[in-house]
């Protein structure tokens, strides 16, 4: 299939982009990498009145380190080697789609798309990162803990453009790990888990088995069991609820063990 007709807007500035979104009145979509948007358009799952292309906006492809965090512009591609400086991203990004899609897909686009099975929203949640958006009301920073509402739903307004994602730098003496199980490499994950350990602390987050990436309170002595008890899994054609709960146990325990080993 091909997309339904839409107006194409090539924005030359962030202001021009959000003005086009305002004019669209909630029926316009932002195009950056397009690896999620274009298939949805082709299958007519989305029928926006306008598509706003932000690829010509200068300055959105920068990766900057400031105040203990890595600021990643909205046009930075998933294959960008600069991202591998963070050990969690270095481990998670190879699980994101395939080489061809990572060459085009953006970090910010994956976060804003809010697919429950996506790897990057999970990492942002675990690290306590944030996104920066700009719109009619100016610029604002949204913590990952306040960003995700439901599958494919965020607190980003229809008239706001994501300009940056912010990732806390690795903490000295901490270890990080990411685990995923999918039917085949590059497929949608059945379960994802990530962990960060250091200074006697432990952070655990899971995805794919929850409506959005979720931080969990776990017992350091039995993290997988505690995580599985907090997750209400739903079954599907590929896995039963019981199987998914077992995946949570195994992947959380694996992620925690590797994070602790790397911290040591």
Image (cartoon, rainbow, N blue to C red):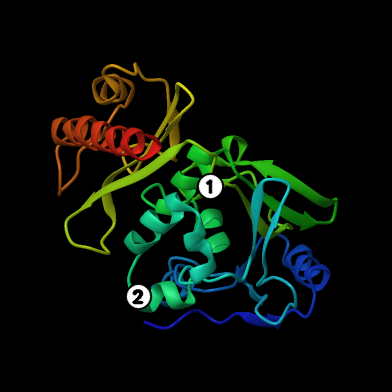
Disc 1 packing (10 Å; few <14; some 14–19; many ≥20) = some
For the point 53% across and 40% down, the residue is 127
Determine which of the numbered discs, if any, sits on residue 29 in the image.
Answer: none
Q: Which mark is residue 99?
A: 2
Residue at which label 1 appears: 153
**Image coords of residue 233 (percent x, y):** 27, 32
Label 1: state its secondary structure.
Answer: strand
Q: Nearer the viewer, residue 167 or 258?
A: 258
Looking at the image, residue 230 lies above or below residue 133: above
Q: Is residue 156 above or below residue 58?
A: above
Mark 2, residues whose alpha carbon is within 10 Å: few (<14), some, or many (≥20)? some
Q: Residue furthest right?
A: 137
Q: Quadrant of the N terminus?
A: bottom left
The total of numbered circles placed on residues is 2
Dot 2 falls on a residue whose secondary structure is helix
Query: x, y (%) of residue 34?
Result: 50, 74
Is 261 left or right of 242, judged from the image as shown?
right
The residue shown at (34%, 66%) is: 97
Q: Is residue 217 left or right of residue 156?
A: left
């Amino acid at each position: 299939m091909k997309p339904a007709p839409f107006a194409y807007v090539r924005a030359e500035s962030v202001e021009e982009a959000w003005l086009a979104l305002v004019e669209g009145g909630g029926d316009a979509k932002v195009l950056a990498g397009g690896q999620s948007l274009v298939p949805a358009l082709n299958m007519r799952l989305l029928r926006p009145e306008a598509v706003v292309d932000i690829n010509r906006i200068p300055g959105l492809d920068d990766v900057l380190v400031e105040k203990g965090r890595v600021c990643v512009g909205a046009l930075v591609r998933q294959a960008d080697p600069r991202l591998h400086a963070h050990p969690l991203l270095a481990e998670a990004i190879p699980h994101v789609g395939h080489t061809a899609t990572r060459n085009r897909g953006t970090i910010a686009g994956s976060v804003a798309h809010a697919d429950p099975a996506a790897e990057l929203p999970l990492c942002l949640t675990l690290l306590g990162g944030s996104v920066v958006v700009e719109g009619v009301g100016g610029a604002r920073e949204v913590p990952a803990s306040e960003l995700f509402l439901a599958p494919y739903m965020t607190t980003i307004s229809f008239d706001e453009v994501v300009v940056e994602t912010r990732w806390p730098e690795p903490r000295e003496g901490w270890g990080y790990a990411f685990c995923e199980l999918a039917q085949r490499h590059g497929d949608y994950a059945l379960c994802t888990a990530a962990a960060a350990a250091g200074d006697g602390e432990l952070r655990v987050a899971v995805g794919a088995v929850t409506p959005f990436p979720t931080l969990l309170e776990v017992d350091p002595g039995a993290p997988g069991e505690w995580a599985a008890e907090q997750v209400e899994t739903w079954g599907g054609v590929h896995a039963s609820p019981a199987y998914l709960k077992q995946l949570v146990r195994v992947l959380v325990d694996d992620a925690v063990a590797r994070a602790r080993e790397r911290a040591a």
